[in-house]
Amino acid sequence: MTAFAIDIGATKIAACRVGPDGMPSEPQTVPTPAVGVWQACVDLLDSVVGGDPVEAIGISTAGPLDGETAGPINIPEWAPGFGLGDAARERYPDARVEVVLDGACAALGEYAFGAGRGATDLLGMIVSSGVGGGIIRSGTVMGGRTGNAGHIGHIPVPDSADVCACGGIGCLEAVASGPSSVRWARANGWTGDTGIELARAAKSGDEIALAAMARAGTALGTAIAGAAALLDIDLVVIGGGFALSGGPLWDPLETALRRHAGLRYLRDLDVVPALLGSGASLAGGAALVGDGYRRWPI
């Protein structure tokens, strides 16, 4: 089968050919334009396809979704809603098209090729400029009614009144993402600008940076404990740039997790770093059109 995968994000678009073993090949990437996003996707895919027949396309996209309509908060042109599935089928009428939220694709990528290999079920998370996620059950991507299942960044966390970009109050993303942590630190007197700087300052012992990272880690650990209790899973895989912050983030995460995950069936819950980095969502898009993986019908 001649299959391809594409990952559509706020800052870049990546596409690749899917190998006979289901593995993604080396991707091509382009910056995400302010306008003409779909045309940029088509141009990139056509370059990767190179004139071959297109039998299947696995599409990972920023969300939220409404079925196969993408309405990403961070892609303004599509924020009102873009019929991504219909557009892909119109351009590639002979292809099987799968459209899945990028967090769910990242979870599937780690399940198929990364830190989740060998697991039965898992929760995948991306902690970066936002907080996203996805749920895998025995190789099946759990989509939910609208395709947004696993979007853990928008569950509320205790003792937070932070306003989220989604319009909600106290969302995990509004507390634990890189930009949210930087905003909190700056409001409390820190003078840096980025999540990378914040993590570096925390590792150097800066008290405000340490407090910001502890706040984020505690919120993440609390949310994970709740999600694991609900889903009855034994593995959580966390990727994303801010998740690379090391001990200042992971130590309070583990402390909060163990404080809240008291039930017997949660005692073996394992939380591990992702292995595939920024390529996880594209790998998940490849897995969608490979053998053995499927999307839960919406």
Image: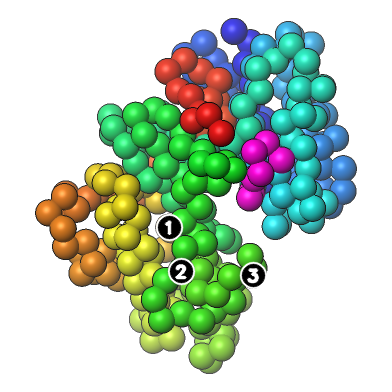
**Sooner in the amino-acid sequence: mark 1 or mark 3:** 3
For label 2, the residue is 156
- Gap between marks 1 and 3, in whole Å? 27 Å
239 or 132: nearer the eye? 132
Q: Name the residue under label 3.
A: 167
Amino acid type at mark 1: Leu
Q: Which of marks 2 and 1 is in front?
A: 2
Image coords of residue 271 (percent x, y): 29, 51
Image x and y of residue 186, in percent: 56, 85
Q: Magenta residues?
A: 63-69
Q: Residues within 10 Å of mark 1 (few under 14, many from 20)?
A: some
User: How many numbered markers are drawn?
Assistant: 3
Q: Do the residues labelled 2 and 3 touch (CB within 8 Å)?
A: no
Q: Image point 38% across, 45% down: which residue?
A: 123
Residue at position x 70%, y 44% in the image: 70
Q: Where is residue 56 in the image (x, y as percent from the top left)?
A: 64, 17
Q: Does the magenta stretch include residue 255?
A: no
Q: Which residue lies under the disc numbered 1?
A: 244
Answer with the quarter of the image where residue 193 lies. bottom right
Q: How crowded is mark 2: few (under 14 residues within 10 Å), some or many (20 or more)?
A: many
The answer to whether mark 2 and mark 1 are in CB contact below 8 A is no
Quick one: quadrant of the N terminus? Answer: top right
Camera-side residue: 162 or 275?
162
